[in-house]
Image (tube, rainbow, N blue to C red):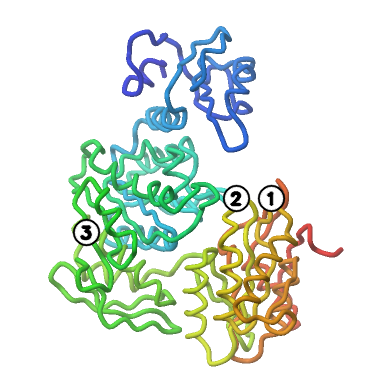
Amino acid sequence: MRLHALLKEILPAGGLPDTEITGLTADSRRVEPGFLFVAVRGQTTDGHRFLAEAAARGAAALAGEAADPGLSRPYLRVDDSRLFLARAASAWHGRSARRMVVLGVTGTDGKTTTSSLIHHILEACGRPTGLVTSVAARIGAREIDTGFHVTTPDPIALQAFLATMVEAGLTHVVIETTSHGLAQQRVAGCDFDVGVLTNVTREHLDYHGSYDAYLDAKARLFEGLAQSPAKPYPVERVAVLNRDDSSFDAVRLRSSVRVVSYGESPQADVRARNPLPGADGLRFDLVAGGATVPVRTRLVGAYNLSNCLAAATAAIEALGLAPEAVAQAMAEFPGVPGRMEMLDLGQPFRAVVDFAHTPNALRRVLQTARGLTRGRVIVVFGAAGLRDRTKRRVMGEIAARLADRTVLTAEDPRTESLEAILDEMAAGAVAGGGREGETFWRIADRGQALRHAVGLAAEGDVVLTCGKGHEQSMAFGETEYPWDDRLALRAAIAERLGLPGPAMPVLPTTER
């Protein structure tokens, strides 16, 4: 693609050289002859340091926020490298978002479940739909891993997914949209039509600095809806907001399009009546579009009521699907890997894997676990290094109050001291009434922690491991080590039962 054609909607046409561009990247190590290299300032590395390396590797053009480095290459000075990269990636891949109805789902908790549920509903109702979540990208029957610890993919990968979806004949796409993805402009070229908000609680303050800044990042999705260009498919731009959440009024005022609300509140446009959570799923009456429709889902936990309502509201109010068809699709939804996922090897207790890694999510999942048993709730979890430290003590306290037994362990300590992280969590557990060695334990190795929890379990108890869910690695230092909570919990259970099973994954904390 010629440079002036690539950038015709991004930069003023005058003065752009007629240079052939063969690729686009923000990683100097991936530059090939003919590429456009975009220098992006990161949290730890400034891409402008690698402009010379990119030129030496054969970049045909360079872009960045700093002054022209004088490397005998066309240099495009831009105000915001991240925004420029996202728009250039969209153009490189044919602005594929303009050829689909694009739904973005954001919030603190429930994004993946809500996104996956909307995708399932649309597919079931005959709308060929793609999906991009923190678990995977789904294009028809294909599922593509989006990577270790990835939420919203980088804009080049994301736009490549969208282009493949258009080529496959998909008409809709649902994108799980994180606060980082919004703040870092990763989704700037996605031309959203419908925005869905699950909730906003205190999370990622290590990155955003304050709750207000975090909320501001989420609100950007709803501010930008009115700016999306016309699409070949008729769709009304709609903001779908949680009427029961404290964020409702603030985000409603920031939304640039019609707002539709959902919740248990009588003021919500789409409501639930008679919710009945149980061990086999969730039942409720859906009140939407002038109809009341009974819904039965396989999703476990009262908190999934909000996720179901969010998905139903997007499908009914934004896309015009019939409430009866939506209810039928929700009944067939199989769930999401690593979200209240039950493991059964014939053990006399329940074993559950969940992704809960925020105070709010941990509280809700422990309350759900309590409803699954007359026995004890035994929970295993940790807290990530280089992330919001304030939640460590809070989560320790929540577990001490709501679980019968707690095992504190490793969860992506990164370059922080795992011992110090466990100290903070243990202090919270003590504040919540926990007694170390009696009701809670610190076991640094996650495999050993799961073995300990499984060893504690008696008939009828629930063993719940939280924080990793679907993820396939754990970060120690700057290295990602293979780790799957589902596999590890199976290994611990098989060992206890004396059955053949998978080997327990090995971490740096594992004693050889």
Q: Nearer the viewer, mark 2 or mark 3?
A: 3
Location of residue 1 by image quarter: top left
Q: Is residue 509 above or below residue 431?
A: above
* Residue furthest front as drawn: 431
Q: Amino acid at mark 2?
A: Phe
The quarter holding residue 314 reads bottom left
Mark 3 sits on what residue? 260
| Disc ID at residue 384 | none
N-terminal label among 1 and 2: 2
Decide which of tag 3 and tag 1 comes sooner along the chain: 3
Say what secondary structure mark 3 lies in.
strand
Callout 1–callout 2 Cβ contact below 8 Å: yes
Give residue 492's position: percent from left, percent from top: 71, 75
Instruction: Give how far across and how far down residue 55 sits, in percent.
Output: 60, 15
**What residue is rendered at 27% in x and 71% in y?**
327
Other-residue count near label 1 (Cα within 10 Å), few / some / many at <14 / 14–19 / ≥20: some
For residue 480, the mark is: 1
Residue type highlighted by circle 3: Val
Query: Furthest-left residue in view?
Result: 290
Residue drawn 35% across the image and 73% down it: 305
Q: Which label belongs to residue 148?
A: 2
Residue 186 image point, x, y percent: 44, 39
How far apart, in angstroms, are the residues tagged by discs 2 and 3? Answer: 34 Å
Q: CA distance from mark 3 to mark 1?
A: 41 Å
Looking at the rendered structure, the secondary structure element under dot 1 is strand
